Amino acid sequence: MKSSVALFGGIGLFCLVVAFIYGFVTGFDELAGFPLLLLTAGLGFMLWWYLRSTDKHHGVMDGDNPEGEIADMAGTYGEFAPWSWWPIGLGASAAFLFFGLAIDWWVFLLGLIPGLFFVTGWVMEFNRKRYAH
């Protein structure tokens, strides 16, 4: 995790420096580049802070061991439903939602109906039928 902390801290610092260089070169007149670079730096610093604060509560992880092997990190990373159709429907409704953002608000609101249905189905999938605990 220490490498991730250093990576996101470096990204935040790099984007902050580039943002001000970009701002001085353009005279702070452009409304897209400078604020978006500042937001990217903020995102890098937020991830840096989160990873740094969670690293204090964990011991040395497998990725931080200089003599570690790739096989040390093998194993299951979660529980997955093997035949789940909910993500496909959620992806289609997300595409419809983004399409609605481009077209008009009523198309977006129409896309919310299947979107909420598929999110609820995916979240509740392990509570029903053969995957119930």
Image: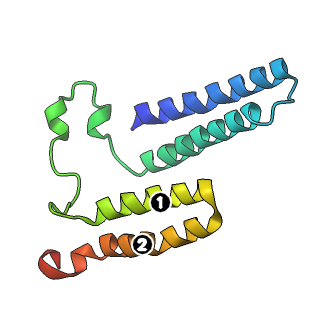
Residue 24, by quadrant, is top right
Q: Are marks 1 and 2 in contact (CB under 8 Å)?
A: yes
User: Label 2 sits on what residue type?
Assistant: Pro
Circle 2 — which element? helix
Instruction: Give residue 118's mark.
Output: none
Circle 1 — which element? helix
Residue density around tag 2, few if under 14, some if 14–19, many if 20 or more, within 10 Å? some
Q: 36 above or below 101?
A: above
Q: Is residue 130 left or right of residue 96?
A: left
Q: Position of residue 48 (x, y in %)?
A: 54, 40
Identified at 20% across, 81% down, the residue is 128
Whether residue 52 is visible: yes
Q: Position of residue 55 (x, y in %)?
A: 43, 45
Which residue, given by chain and number where applicable, does mark 1 sit on? Answer: 96
Q: Position of residue 113 (x, y in %)?
A: 47, 75
Q: How is the image coloured?
A: rainbow
User: Label 1 sits on what residue type?
Assistant: Phe
Identified at 61% across, 70% down, the residue is 106
For the residue pair 83 and 112, the one nearer the viewer reads as 112
Identified at 32% across, 33% down, the residue is 64
For the residue pair 20 and 33, the one nearer the viewer reads as 33
Q: Is residue 76 left or right of residue 116?
A: left
What residue occupies the far bottom of the structure in this picture? 128
What residue occupies the far top of the structure in this picture? 25
Which residue, given by chain and number where applicable, does mark 2 sit on? Answer: 114
